Amino acid sequence: MVRPSQRRFKEICAEILASNGGIRFVGIADGKSRIIASEFRSGTSPLLSQDESALSFVLSIVKIKSDKALRPKLGNIRCSIALYEKIAIATMPLGTAHFLMVSLDRDIDHESIIFNDIWPVKAKIDNLDIGSAADRKSAPQ
């Protein structure tokens, strides 16, 4: 399978952002928590600096990666949602080696947006091989 390019990651962000007016920000990070693509809703002012956004990604990804002890009983984490006073942030694995982070307006139906608007786009991406070279070498044939 073909791995998405930087341009494709930007297109994914734009597609998710366009799926619902309640989405403020969409970003994709690699397995090392480096932001590789992001888009803000037009007219939206970032609440965090670039460094704070990077830290937010790291903390969210650590949460997702740290649940290994629970996976045998609960299964893989599909989405982690943090509800703040001003916004909500949903973070989810994207393929085998990336993570999707979406910031949402506060007073909206977050679950509906995640599962009805974001999830269909994410599902298409999960079917692509967007893992790292090391993941592809160790994947079962």
Image: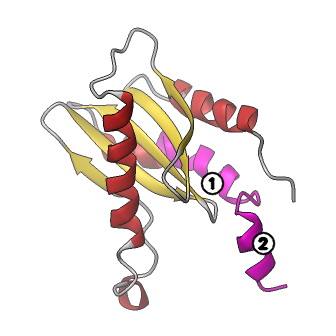
Determine whether, in the image, residue 47 is placed left or right of residue 86. right
Magenta residues (range)? 116-141
Q: What amino acid type should be assigned to the residue bearing mark 2? A: Arg
136 part of magenta stretch: yes
Q: Position of residue 86 (x, y in %)?
A: 17, 30
* SS majority, magenta: helix
At a point 73% along the width and 72% down the height, the residue shown is: 134
Q: Position of residue 111 (x, y in %)?
A: 34, 48
- Quadrant occupied by the C terminus: bottom right
Q: Position of residue 61 (x, y in %)?
A: 40, 59
Dot 1 lies on which element?
helix
> Of the residues under marks 1 and 2, which one precedes in the sequence?
1
Q: Which residue is mark 2?
A: 136
Q: Mark 1 or mark 2: which is in front?
A: 2
Number of residues whose C-alpha sits closer than 10 Å to that of mark 1, classed few (under 14), some (14–19) or many (20 or more): few
Q: Which residue reaches farthest bottom?
A: 72
Q: What amino acid type should be assigned to the residue bearing mark 1? A: Ala
- Can the viewer see residue 32 in this picture? yes
Q: Which residue is mark 1?
A: 123
At a point 45% along the width and 19% down the height, the residue shown is: 41
Q: Which residue reaches farthest front?
A: 51
Q: Answer whether labels 1 and 2 touch (C-beta < 8 Å).
A: no
138 part of magenta stretch: yes
Dot 2 lies on which element?
helix
